[in-house]
Image (cartoon, rainbow, N blue to C red):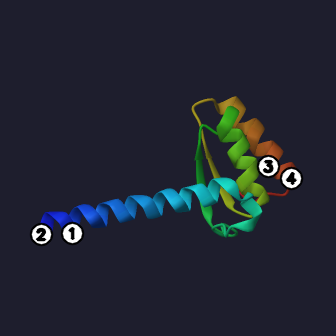
Amino acid sequence: MEEYLESLFVTLKAILLLILSTIRNIFPTGWLPRKDVKGQTVLITGSGSGLGRLMSFEFGKLGARIVLWDINEDGNLETLRELESRGVEH
């Protein structure tokens, strides 16, 4: 009986998570609540190029305090200059 209840619980939990993930994928991002990162410190690794750079810009738009980290020092400095020109705190 205990195994049956545990199986039932796991199945219901899986169904609930499936429903929630479907809702999150159907509705536009603006409709669902987002975590507020304004004033929070965000560490971005790989900020010298690619996704890390783009994430730096996005978190900067949201008002987060950005910490940049990358082995590509030139790219990292370029990202820093771009963030400063946009008025993002670092």
The answer to which of marks 4 and 2 sits earlier in the sequence is 2
Q: Residue 52, image x and y in percent?
A: 65, 40
Q: Residue 36, image x and y in percent?
A: 66, 70
CA gap, disc 4 to disc 2? 61 Å
Q: Residue 76 lies in what quarter of the image?
A: top right
The reply to whether dot 4 and dot 2 touch (C-beta < 8 Å) is no
Q: Residue 25, image x and y in percent?
A: 64, 53
CA gap, disc 1 to disc 3? 54 Å
Label at residue 86:
4
The reply to whether dot 4 and dot 3 touch (C-beta < 8 Å) is yes
Residue 74 appears anywhere in the view: yes
CA gap, disc 1 to disc 4? 55 Å
The answer to which of marks 2 and 3 sits earlier in the sequence is 2
CA gap, disc 2 to disc 3? 59 Å
Q: Which residue is mark 3?
A: 83
Type of amino acid under label 4 = Arg
Question: Which label lies toward us, 4 or 2?
Answer: 2
CA gap, disc 4 to disc 3? 5 Å
CA gap, disc 2 to disc 1? 6 Å
Type of amino acid under label 3 = Leu
Q: Residue 40, image x and y in percent?
A: 63, 67
> Neighbour class for label 4 at 10 Å: few (<14), some, many (≥20)?
few
Q: Is residue 13 above or below residue 83?
A: below
**55 lies left or right of 84:** left
> Neighbour class for label 2 at 10 Å: few (<14), some, many (≥20)?
few
Question: Which label lies toward us, 1 or 3?
Answer: 1
